[in-house]
Amino acid sequence: MAFTHYAVLIDNLDTDVLFFQTFGTKWIVLNSLKASSELLDQRGSNYADRPRFVMFEEMGWSPTLTWLRWGPKCHLHRKVLQPPFAKSKVKQYQAHQRREALILAKGVVDNPEDWMNCVRRFSVAVVLKITYGLDVDSHTSPWIKLGEDSAEAVGKSGAPASSLMDRFPATRYLPSWLPFMERLRFAHTWRPAIQKITELPFQAALELPASVPSFVRSRMRARTAESPFTLSDIKGAAATILIAGNDTTSSTLNLLVLYLLQNPGAQRRAQAEVDSVTAGGTRLPDFADLQRLPYLNLILNETYRICPLSPLGIPHASIKDDVYQGRFIPAGTIVYPNVWAMNRDEKVYRKPELFWPERFESRDKGGWGEPLPVGNFGFGRRICIGRNLAENSLLIALAILLATTEIGWPIGEDGEEERFEAEFCFRGQAIVLPFRASFISRSEKLRDLLEQEIGGCQ
Ligand code: HEM
């Protein structure tokens, strides 16, 4: 895999906890699941803080849970943001997720060259409706571009808390044209876009009839003059869902497409499984079918394992002094869970470079009985609040794509497959760079079913 970044380098140091210090800042990288669970889960109350993200302050984010230090504001944001995404609550979004997944499947078959935009549309549409009550009504909707901008602003801003200004906040006042102030230039370039991401959908949500349900509408209703959750908090929390929710979903779907086209055996097995629950492809999959699609779940987990979106997680920080494995950890130490190393730990995963969903199946079924990866959504008190929603989006999209299309290598003008080596970029998140793929409808009947269910949607 053409993919190098420092999580890989740290992966080779053969220690499960790496301690180091730079210019007075203490850092820990947790290379094993055991160490991550012991510190971030079991001693979670002491590792729930975040370092200060000066670069994101420079970018002009409104209060954003992901970057908030542990304290009253953070507690308030988690209290407001967690309930709508609890396992029991995300059921209410399923009809919307399924409809968007059908639009995605039709989009990739009609316009295979534009398939990554269809994936972006799906991911933005799911969270835009839930958050603001807004619809993405075409492939050229400006909301898709907004989602893309938010992905660019976060995904390419570098590993969180690692810039010069994060370590030396006073350097934010240096001229941004200085050669070593590239991250400050990046922050200033994206400032107007961040402003748009926060304001435009928020204003559009307020213009909708009051009867249209959304996160913004419910928070605006609950707001009083004394309410500690201010207007700026509502805007920030809403933007958090849009930003944290859209790129993570589309990046994972891009990876799923990549691994399915590279692994036709896995694709065929998954399709057979889907066909077995849809009476041989005579109807399209629904949420009720997902529990009977265990192999799809393994494909998703193998995708999480082999390419975690945040290879070094989002850093936590310690609140009080602590001691671990005989080492002193002062308050304020920055802690990175190295999910990349955990998911490729050869003591846990045989042939970790191999994409093989069967590895999680028990030995009597021919698998290796290996554990599902657990760190991709983070740890302890800062664990991702959107994981239930994300899994529902990914599984229904995967089920509907597999039910309706054959995913393959792109076909050249000579009619031959054009195989390629995927390229990845790591500047904050692990992102697979754009690639071509073919999506061929599995039958006319399935195409008609798609058309019938989504009607005249563009
Ligand atoms: C495949 C999809 C996703 C992945 C892999 C993912 C991964 C993560 C990770 C690694 C963290 C950091 C956890 C930690 O610090 O320990 C996180 C935090 C967060 N995620 Fe997700 N996420 C996904 C989808 C979503 C969605 C759909 C939403 C919104 C609905 C969301 C909202 C958040 C928020 C608000 C936080 C910050 C939590 C905090 O700092 O307290 N995520 N996510």
Image (cartoon, rainbow, N blue to C red):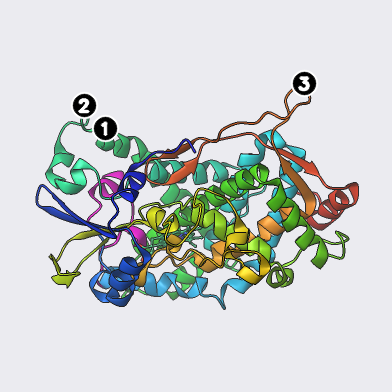
Mark carried by residue 414: 3
Viewer can see residue 60: no
Residue 305 percent location from the top left of the image? 50, 56
Disc 2: which residue: 179
Circles 1, 2 touching at the beta carbon (< 8 Å): yes
Q: Residue 181: say if magenta.
A: no
Q: Is residue 318 above or below residue 404?
A: below
Disc 1: which residue: 182
Mark 2 burial class by Cα count in 10 Å: few <14, some 14-19, many 20+: few
Looking at the picture, tell me which residue is in the foreground, 190 or 297: 297
Looking at the picture, tell me which residue is in the foreground, 285 or 339: 339
Decide if residue 32 is on the left or right side of residue 387: left
* Ligand 1 quarter of the rendering: bottom left
Residue at screen point 28% across, 69% down: 48
Q: Is residue 263 above or below residue 336?
A: above
Residue extending farthest to the top is: 414
Region rendered in magenta = 52-71
Q: Residue 68: say if magenta.
A: yes
Q: CA distance from mark 1 to mark 2?
A: 7 Å
Decide if residue 446 is on the left or right side of residue 273: right
Question: Mark 1, mark 3: which one is toward the viewer?
Answer: 3
